[in-house]
Image: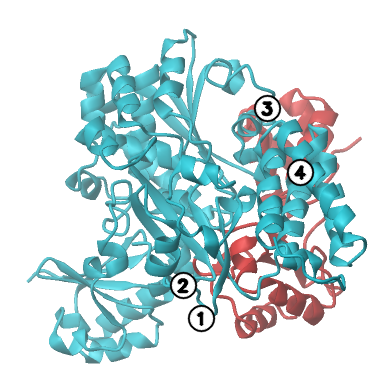
Chain colours: A cyan, B red
Amino acid sequence: MTSIRFFIPRDAAAIAVGADGVAAALAKAAQAAGRNIEIVRTGSRGMMWLEPLLEVESHGVRHGFGPLEPDDIPGLVAAGLLDGHSIGLATHRKSVGPVEQISFFARQTRLTFTRCGVIDPLSLDDYRAHGGYVGLEQALALGGAGIVDVVAKSGLRGRGGAGFPTGIKWKTVHETTADQKYIVCNADEGDSATFADRMIMEGDPFLLIEGMTIAGIAVGATKGYIYVRSEYPHAIATLKEAIQLARKAGLLGANVAASKQAFDLEVRTGAGAYVCGEETALLDSLEGKRGIVRAKPPLPAHKGLFGRPTVINNVLSLAAVPFILSEGAKVYADLGMGRSRGTMPIQLAGNIKHGGLFETAFGMTLGELVDDVGGGTFSGRPVKAVQVGGPLGAYFPRALFDTPFDYEAFTAKGGLVGHGGITVFDDTADMAKQARFAFEFCAIESCGKCTPCRIGSTRGVETIDKIMAGDGAEDHLALVTDLCNTMKFGSLCALGGFTPYPVMSALTHFPDDFRRAKRLPQAAE
Amino acid sequence: MPETTAEETARAIAAERGNRPDELLEILHDVQSALGYVPEAVVPALAQALNLSRAEVHGVVTFYHDFRAKPAGRHVLKLCRAEACQSMGCETLVERAESRLGIACGETSADGRVTLEPIYCLGLCATAPSAMMDGRIVGRLTPERLDALLKEAGA
């Protein structure tokens, strides 16, 4: 008799809410009952409100229970959990039914996250059984120029936030001659509301390894680095283990997959500096220096890590590549809208009922995502604002909820898609406070190289403080607007350059929050 | 002049990593995990080992938030104060921890038991508010769970 298989995530978000305890309780219950069960620790399906989510396989269908606590296990066992799925279990109060039929899950187009939450992240057999390393095979057959062409045709744009066409970046490095080239993966996912990179690294690390290997073959780079933030210890540990396994299996090293191509990887740990998510600061940090932003040009594609041509891409950009190679550029490019092709792993976070990872083709409106998919706020109060794109993204009011998720559409409304994080705030949020925090965060994290960012952010905090104290608000509002203009156009990188997005959007869309301290008739905008 | 233990430790760690200057961050992480902080005394030793100037090493140590100049308390409680956690009321939790410990965020309690620090995002943004206690991550933090963490730390 084959043993029943159970699945519990090892994703950090699941662990943070008690997944390890649930797994231990299940193992203990099985042992007490003398039953031989198999517990697979997977990545997360991304339905974070259900974590810890336990799944049991029955006739090829995985039924879920969540959010669980260790104390729920005895009741579930009494209802027949160790005998596989049954009617008694289906009516259990923590039953969520077949996991893949949950609306949040069923309406997604999971290309990048197709295996995340399904397989054992550190099983190469699982990875291969679910379509892994088919892309690499294709890549080896196509060769460098061929791969670059496919990636360009897919329309893939940098998922880190800038949205720069990946194919063009790769082409530049491909065409540059050098004794050594590098692939650098930017896994310094510092934006609040984003966790898609972390989920891939913890839930499907071979996908990232495969994507980077393909990038290496495409541009002729033999060495890659993954720069992971220190706040992600689980991701770092999983990646390091996966790299060892890939090396042992001959998928990294002097002859990748028995080919003549060499490629190897190293994981490097950041040290708590947000600015290192900026690509040139990241490169300096990888070189062991302070994470100071470099002036461009030269572009990293020409002079990157250690002065050599370097492809630097976000985790999600690299993780999209194996699918594009295995299924073809057209399948990917057929999804999306306008110049935003393919899918975007959107992250619903903050004060939201159904938060988590939602991968979908570009084009869904912000309102659908927040109200429909996300189910509104966790608190049950009305949504006041959503911040899209992390700490440097704009605050959007409900009036802009018809904006489709698309790079250009967001730019047109004074915002940005960024890394796809959406933080929901209910009506208790004070937008003046949020604007102040944007300046404060910039001041804490500024690398200090350029004046608008280093000094402007501090002056911004001081000025907002005066506004909040009701001290000559109108003059100070004009000053903040002017300061934002200087920061936007005078900063070296997106930290100083984009801090105006949250500040100005708060000011534009929620003017009342900035004026309430003054006893003036309300001037509606 | 005889070398202190801290300097010897730092030299040994640097040597393990081939005295490579590009590995400075990794070396500093290792030094901190061995000593609990990065004492000023290791700066000249590392500079010499990696063939860097003392200014360069000092610059790196002080640039990154992770590296401590002094030892932390016996327990380190990091509360996330980024936007997603703000939307779920993390500031109330920070105030609660501050008043329970009688310190401001960023300080160590007088008895040396707990260091309270801000952290900007643990990537647990759909199960906010989040915290990290001695490397252990905690999601869906409530006042009660915070109190339990503080109690666990002996505060």
Q: Check if mark 1's residue and mark 2's residue have beta carbons within 8 Å.
A: yes
Chain name for mark 1: A
Q: How many numbered marks does the figure carry?
A: 4
User: How far apart are the alpha carbons under marks 1 and 2?
Assistant: 7 Å
Q: What residue type is labelled 4?
A: Cys
User: How far apart are the alpha carbons under marks 2 and 4?
Assistant: 31 Å
The residue to which callout 2 is attached is A376
User: How far apart are the alpha carbons under marks 3 and 4?
Assistant: 38 Å
Residue at the spot x=28%, y=31% of the render? Answer: A250
The local secondary structure at tag 2 comes to: loop
Chain name for mark 4: A
* In the foreground, A35 or A497: A497
Does mark 2 fall on the same chain as mark 1?
yes
Mark 1, Cα crowd under 10 Å, few <14 / some 14-19 / many 20+, is: few
Q: Which mark identifies residue A380?
A: 1
The local secondary structure at tag 4 comes to: helix
Answer with mark 2 or mark 4, whichever residue precedes in sequence: 2
Does mark 2 fall on the same chain as mark 3?
no
Residue A77 percent location from the top left of the image: 25, 87
* In the foreground, B76 or B43: B76
Q: What residue type is labelled 1?
A: Gly
Mark 3, Cα crowd under 10 Å, few <14 / some 14-19 / many 20+, is: many
Q: Which mark identifies residue A457?
A: none
The local secondary structure at tag 3 comes to: helix
The residue to which callout 3 is attached is B21
Chain name for mark 2: A
From the image, state whether disc 1 or disc 4 is nearer to you. Answer: 4
The residue to which callout 4 is attached is A484
